[in-house]
Amino acid sequence: MSTALREQICLLAKSMFDRGLTGGSTGNISARTADGGLLVSPTGTSFGRLDPARLSHFDVNGVLVDGDPPTKEMPLHAAFYDTRSTAGAVVHLHSCHSVAWSMMPEVDADNFLPPMTPYAIMKLGKVKLLPFYRPGDPAAGKALRGLAGKRSAVMLANHGPVVAGKDVEAACNAIEELEDTARLAMLMRGLPARMLDETQVQDLVTHFNVEWND
């Protein structure tokens, strides 16, 4: 088992915790291992104090082989891994501004983030806003599966974002971009902000080969 991957998961989680992107014992993170298994943050743990040796370790068949019991949000992680062949890691946060933006009545459920900067488009594509589900409810994973792998990121209303990436660093970078864009949206709410226009968005989509599913 890769000691480096275990340490990277804990390092990136602590970085997000230290910067207030998720607090207390909220949030969860997972990554594919080289042999096709999974490392997952345990249930009830804090991103600021993850122990590399106690991460939940699943084998390629989804059997917990060592470590502590996993997060109750495993249905979300499993849904991404099962529907997106490119998913090498999944991150879920309770980040403040993205949660706040999910409560706003003008939000487009099919394209959660307004086109404010190029980076959210480049790193996330379109983000789908899903309805509220009780934390740990398998129905949230079922809703994510219903997207058939067409989105790399979803926002759980009144709860927090879930993002898949090719590896743990990419997933963390993307979810931070989601939170930054939601923060901008809240800061600019009600102001006559100049958004990227459709031509600019399509240029980014084409130039960076972005998944931009309708």
Image: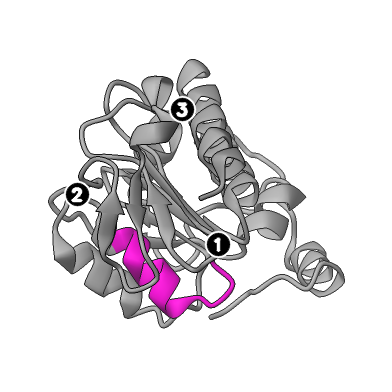
Pinpoint residue 159: horizontal percent, then vertical percent: 27, 43
> Of helix, strand and loop, which one carries label 3?
loop
Q: Is residue 84 above or below residue 21?
A: below
Q: Disc 1 to disc 3, how far (Cα)?
A: 21 Å
**Residue 151 percent coordinates (x, y):** 50, 70
Which residue carries the number 3 mark? Answer: 21
Residue bearing the label numbered 1 = 88
Tell me if residue 210 comes above or below residue 51 in the rendering. Answer: below
Q: Nearer the viewer, mark 3 or mark 2?
A: 2
Q: Which mark is residue 183?
A: none
The mark nearer the N terminus, 2 or 1, is 2
From the viewer's side, name the closer residue of 79 and 6. 6
**Magenta residues (range):** 76-87
- 191 or 149: nearer the eye? 149
Q: Determine the image quadrant of residue 137.
A: bottom left
Please say which color scheme the image uses: one colour
How would you classify the magenta stretch by its main secondary structure? helix
Residue at image point 75% right, 51% down: 118
| Element at label 1 | loop
* Residue at (55% x, 40% y) in the render: 3
Amino acid found under the numbered disc labelled 3: Leu
For discs 1 and 3, the disc positioned in front in the rendered view: 1
